[in-house]
């Protein structure tokens, strides 16, 4: 079983985007916990989510589906999901799938902040 | 096999229980009473057996046990506690079945409410006792029975004694199977004069042993049934998928095909197809559904139907995939997507016009030793977004008569893993293609698969593998220069 961790940074205010760090592997085993934790944040009313992917080493189609689900839910409520600094390997998966056209992927923090602010 | 074990146990138990009951009744001279008890014993064991063969429902079994125990042991009330192991919490005993007016061990308060039997029963069923606490918890911890002939003398039972419900004596016996404590049976207030004694205890222990064995078997049965159900579901999905994949490989004067498909042990969702459109054109598709098991297979079946219908009426791969995308985006569950490459090959000219919906790159290798060329036109996986956003997906053309080989595959090929969790990878894959370019497609397919087998050393596959190689048979035209793939202008939807 590969490793996995999810670090959720405390939010300043409910209206502010929340930052989470996704570490290790997001596959069909780890995706269950991932979805549970993040959908719980959305249940709390979080509308902007920045997922830091710098330490994500692997993502499977199950992981992609999970990100899709979160994006869909956030956008339905006028919110947004930002993917921050994916590694070359993960970015390649996004590019092959054509996800660079669907997901909001940014290379630095300031881009992340401005992408969410409406 | 379980029936044989159960029969054996029944025989042993019948002997044990019958002997004990006879002993207890030896003071009674009435033959009638003894006969009645014997019948009751057989009836109990028979019902236990039935509850097991009927598929095994733990609560029903427990009710049979408590009912019999209460009567056989001449107890006014009985309660069965089950030991539960909750994640991240200490093991705890929860009351599951109660008969008679069993004294509530906790929570008795309001005297008026206590006068109502229903309320008392509900209170008892809410009881949860940590292992080690009071007689119930101690018996669970030690796995040894406990006899309390005078409940009033027992400090740990004070709350129950003062509850207002009659509480004279108590027998507590563990249910132990294969060395594990499954629960505890508590019997209160002997009805036939005097307090519970050692013989009463021995009978209760025999009943509890039988109950434990039965409950253990119920548990095992449930686990086996669940595993069987899952295996059946996967087997069904695999059979279903195999039915939908092509059984024969097409062949033409100028073009030959070779393919390889092998599902993983866990059903994945790969798909490939050859769809003849007319006598000089054939549609070729390779795809990968993200969902697993039956849901994945159903998505694949639906995509296949839509694709085959559209392929016959359209000569634009992009338009075909657009329609498939719209269907998929509408019908599939949240998060399910399909990557796919669909192209139309003119088997006379070698012109291959294709579209890549988020799928692996299309590979070509002109000649042995030449570099592998990757085609990665813009494209989005199917099923994610509806309508015009799919429009960025571009069509591209390859001239097979110049390129000689076209290789289509799914990620199961490059992501095949060995024992060291290393992936087979593009480098190795491309190397085999380079080594085999110019050979018949069947040779190339064989070589790739042999190379993967060699790499994975027989480790079970974790994803479906699909590989399709299209080769141009006609002799190489010396005048043809290498035709650069022409990107068709991105048409608006």
Image (spheres, helix red, strand yellow):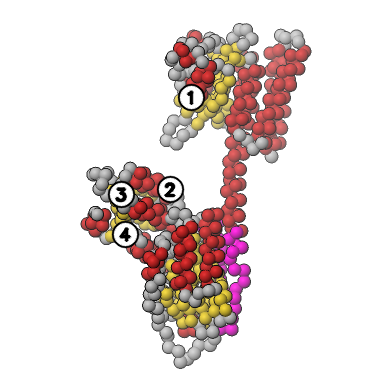
Q: Is residue B124 above or below residue B179?
A: above
Horizontal and vertical percent position of residue B427: 42, 69
Tag nearer the camera, 4 or 3: 3
In the figure, B65 relative to B255: above or below? above
Give how far apart the Cα atoms at labels 1 and 4 are.
51 Å
Residue bearing mark 2: A32
For the residues marked 4 and 3, what is the alpha-carbon distance in whole angstroms? 14 Å
Let me know if residue B314 appears in the view: yes
Q: Nearer the viewer, mark 2 or mark 1?
A: 1
Q: Secondary structure at mark 4?
A: strand
Name the residue rendered at 46%, 59% in the picture: B330
Residue at image mark 3: A47
Indicate yes or no whether the magenta region holds residue B273: no
Quarter of the image for the C terminus of chain B: give it: bottom left
Q: Circle 1 is placed at which residue position?
A: B126
Same chain check for tags 4 and 3? yes
Q: Secondary structure at mark 3?
A: loop
- Kindly identify the residue that appears in the image at 65 percent across and 22 percent down: B68
Task: Report which residue position mark 4 lands on.
Answer: A104
Q: Residues within 10 Å of mark 4 (few under 14, many from 20)?
A: some
Drawn side of residue B162 relative to residue A77, left or right: right
Neighbours of disc 2 within 10 Å: few (<14), some (14-19), many (20+): some
Per the rendered image, the range of residues in magenta is B240-268
Q: Earlier in the sequence, mark 3 or mark 2?
A: 2
Q: Nearer the viewer, mark 3 or mark 2?
A: 3
Q: Earlier in the sequence, mark 2 or mark 4?
A: 2
Image side of residue B225 versus residue B164, left or right: right
């Amino acid at each position: 079983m590969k490793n996995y961790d999810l670090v959720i940074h405390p939010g300043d205010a409910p209206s502010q985007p929340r930052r989470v760090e996704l570490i290790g592997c997001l596959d069909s085993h780890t995706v269950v916990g991932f979805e549970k934790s993040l959908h719980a944040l959305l249940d709390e009313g979080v509308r902007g989510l920045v997922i830091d992917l710098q330490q994500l080493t692997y993502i499977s189609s199950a992981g992609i589906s999970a990100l899709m689900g979160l994006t869909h839910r956030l956008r339905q409520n006028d919110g947004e999901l930002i993917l921050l600094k994916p590694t070359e390997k993960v970015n390649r998966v996004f590019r092959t799938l054509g996800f660079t056209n669907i997901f909001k992927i940014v290379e630095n923090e300031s881009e992340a902040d401005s992408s969410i602010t409406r | 096999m379980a029936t044989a074990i159960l029969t054996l146990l029944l025989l042993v138990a019948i002997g044990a229980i019958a002997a004990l009951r006879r002993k207890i009744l030896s003071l009674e001279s009435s033959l009638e009473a003894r006969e009645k008890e014997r019948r009751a014993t057989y009836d109990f064991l028979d019902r236990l057996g039935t509850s097991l063969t009927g598929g095994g429902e733990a609560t029903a079994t427990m009710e049979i046990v408590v009912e019999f125990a209460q009567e056989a042991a001449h107890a006014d009330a009985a309660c069965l506690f089950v030991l539960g192991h909750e994640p991240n919490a200490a093991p705890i005993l929860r009351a599951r079945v109660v008969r008679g007016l069993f004294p509530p061990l906790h929570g008795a308060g309001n005297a008026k409410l206590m006068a109502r039997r229903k309320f008392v029963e509900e209170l008892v069923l809410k009881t949860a006792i940590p292992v080690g606490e009071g007689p119930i918890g101690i018996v669970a911890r030690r796995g040894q029975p406990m006899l309390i002939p005078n409940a009033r003398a027992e400090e740990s039972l004070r709350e129950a004694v003062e509850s207002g419900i009659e509480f004279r004596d108590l027998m507590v016996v563990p249910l132990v199977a294969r060395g594990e404590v499954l629960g505890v049976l508590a019997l209160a207030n002997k009805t036939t004069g005097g307090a519970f004694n050692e013989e009463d205890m021995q009978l209760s222990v025999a009943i509890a042993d039988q109950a434990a064995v039965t409950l253990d078997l119920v548990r095992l049965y449930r686990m086996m049934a669940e595993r069987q159900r899952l295996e059946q579901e996967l087997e069904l999905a695999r059979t279903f998928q195999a039915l939908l994949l092509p059984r024969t490989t097409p062949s033409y004067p100028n073009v030959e095909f070779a393919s390889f498909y092998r599902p993983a042990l866990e059903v994945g969702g790969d798909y490939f197809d050859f769809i003849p459109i007319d006598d000089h054109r054939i549609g070729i598709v390779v795809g990968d559904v993200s969902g697993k098991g039956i849901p994945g297979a159903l998505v694949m079946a639906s995509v296949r139907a839509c694709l085959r219908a559209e392929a016959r009426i359209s000569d634009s791969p992009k338009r075909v995939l657009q329609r498939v995308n719209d269907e998929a985006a509408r019908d599939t569950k949240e998060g399910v997507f399909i990557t796919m490459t669909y192209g139309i090959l003119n088997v006379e000219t070698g012109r291959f016009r294709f579209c890549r919906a988020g799928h692996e790159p299309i590979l070509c290798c002109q000649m042995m030793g030449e570099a592998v060329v990757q085609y990665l036109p813009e494209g989005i996986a199917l099923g994610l977004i509806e309508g015009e956003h799919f429009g960025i997906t571009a069509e591209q053309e390859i001239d097979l008569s110049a390129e000689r080989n076209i290789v289509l595959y799914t990620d199961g090929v490059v992501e095949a893993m060995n024992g060291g969790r290393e992936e087979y990878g593009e480098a190795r894959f491309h190397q085999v293609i380079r080594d085999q370019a110019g050979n018949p497609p069947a040779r190339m397919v064989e070589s790739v698969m042999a190379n993967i087998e060699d790499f994975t050393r027989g480790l079970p596959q974790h994803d479906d593998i699909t590989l399709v190689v299209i080769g141009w048979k006609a002799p190489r035209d010396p005048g043809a220069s290498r035709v650069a793939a022409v990107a068709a202008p991105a048409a608006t939807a």
